[in-house]
Structures are given as structure tokens and as C-alpha cells.
Amino acid sequence: MLTLSNARVVELRRYQLRSPAHVDVLHDLFERHLIAGQSAAGIQVGRLYRDVDAPEMFVWWRGFVGMPARRTALADFYDGPVWKEHRDVANETMIDSDDVLLLRWAAQSPSVEIGGRDNEYPAAATGIIRHLPQRDGGEIATRVATSLRARLGSRASILLTECSVNDFPRLPVRPEPTLVWHAPFPTAHQRDDAVAALSADAEWIDLISDACGDVETDIELLRLATISH
């Protein structure tokens, strides 16, 4: 069975919606129709999040068997009856839906299933490091994984940019080489403590700077919460 941990291609999608209330509208649409519709097309939908620091943001994961399967699955879904029926309502919630990263798992296997639908991990921290020196992505991923394991007390999932051409151009993806790490937490308090500690950790900041060398990187650290009504 396809899960995000065995998907060869993973998308991290961040949508800016019209208001925090629209996050609830879109979440309800996913739960009622869009998760099942994508699953029927061969797409594995993962967790759905709100960004704690930007509550109008809707953040979610989905995965595919591979790039050819992705192209087929997206065509089946976006040309199919479920999206045609509900796209107007979905699109009405959105200001921007183009902040999308096309990713693959780094050599380190994910320790926690980012695609789970249970409520065991209602909070998460996600780091996005853009404009990596592409040739060194694997080495940087290893250093980041080792450092996070020591600092968080658990192993974060690590993903890197999938370098294949986006062959479904109706849905754009960001082109810059990127590393994403994702660590779920059982409580918001544990997540916030981890994010605060990382943000104040000079050795961690230096590690990222040293790993990326002379390349000017763009680093984001997100505090995420699963969406509930």
C-alpha cells in the first residue's frame, strides 16, 4: 500500500488562503471529498496543517509512486468528477497555491510516518532550507539529520528536491534546490520548546551556514498544528 514513507515522490504544498476561517472550509472539503478523490486517483494524501504563526496558511503533504505515476494521477484527479464538482469552492478559499516543493526522501529513512491520519502527533516543526548547493545535497542531509537527532531527541524526516522535470506544468513547483526536515510532536508545548531551542542554538545555525558554504540560503522554521474544528 502506498504511504508517504514509501512514496518515491512527495509534495509539500503551502496555500495562502483568504482568512483563517477559510482554512477550516478547505479542511472540511478535503475531509469530505478531496482526500477520497485523490486516493482513488492513486495519490496518498498526508497530514493537513495550519501554520501557527500564519493561521491563514494551509499546509499539506501528498505522495506518488513515482514521476510517471504522478503525471497520470494528477491528470486523473484534476480532469475527474470530484475536482470538477468541488474546485470552485476550493479555489474560492485561496489567494495563492503555487508555493509547492517537489521532493524525494533523502538517504535517511523517515522515522515517523508524515502521512498518518491519526491524532497521535497533532503538532509538528518543519524546516525549509532553500538554495542549497545541489551537488552536496546528500552530504548536507546527513549532517542535518545527525544534528537534529541530537537536538530533538528523535529522528526527523529529511527530504530533498526531486530533480526530475515537472511534467504536469498545470501545477507549478518551486525550482530552487531545497532541503526539508519534518519532526512531529505529541504536544504543542514540546514543538514550541524544540523550535525555540533550535532558533537560539548558535551551533545549529553555524552548521547550516557551514554546510551550505558560500551559497546564500533562505531558511524557514514552521510551527504546524493539525486542523480540528
Image: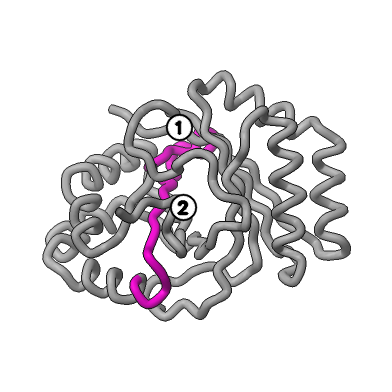
Foreground of the two, 32 or 119: 119
The picture quadrant where one finds residue 154 is top right
The residue pinned by badge 1 equals 225
Residue 77 within the segment the image draws in magenta: no
User: How dense is the environment of label 1, judged by Cα within 10 Å: few (below 14), some, or many (20 and up)?
Assistant: many
Q: Are marks 2 and 1 in contact (CB under 8 Å)?
A: no
At numbered mark 1, what does the secondary structure look like: helix, strand or loop? strand
Q: Which residues are magenta?
A: 48-69
Instruction: Give the total number of marks visible in the rendering.
Output: 2
| Spot occupied by residue 150 in the image (x, y as percentages of width and height) | 74, 32
Q: Please determine whether, in this image, residue 149 is positioned above or below residue 37.
A: above
Residue 112 relative to residue 87: left or right? right
What residue lies at 82% left-to-right and 42% top-to-bottom? 205
Residue 167 relative to residue 79: left or right? right
The picture quadrant where one finds residue 133 is bottom right
| Spot occupied by residue 10 in the image (x, y as percentages of width and height) | 46, 59
Foreground of the two, 113 or 53: 113
Which colouring convention does the figure follow? one colour
Residue 14, label in figure: 2
Residue 60 within the segment the image draws in magenta: yes
Residue 182, label in figure: none
Q: Please determine whether, in this image, residue 151 is positioned above or below residue 31.
A: above
- Asked if residue 147 shows in the view, the reply is yes
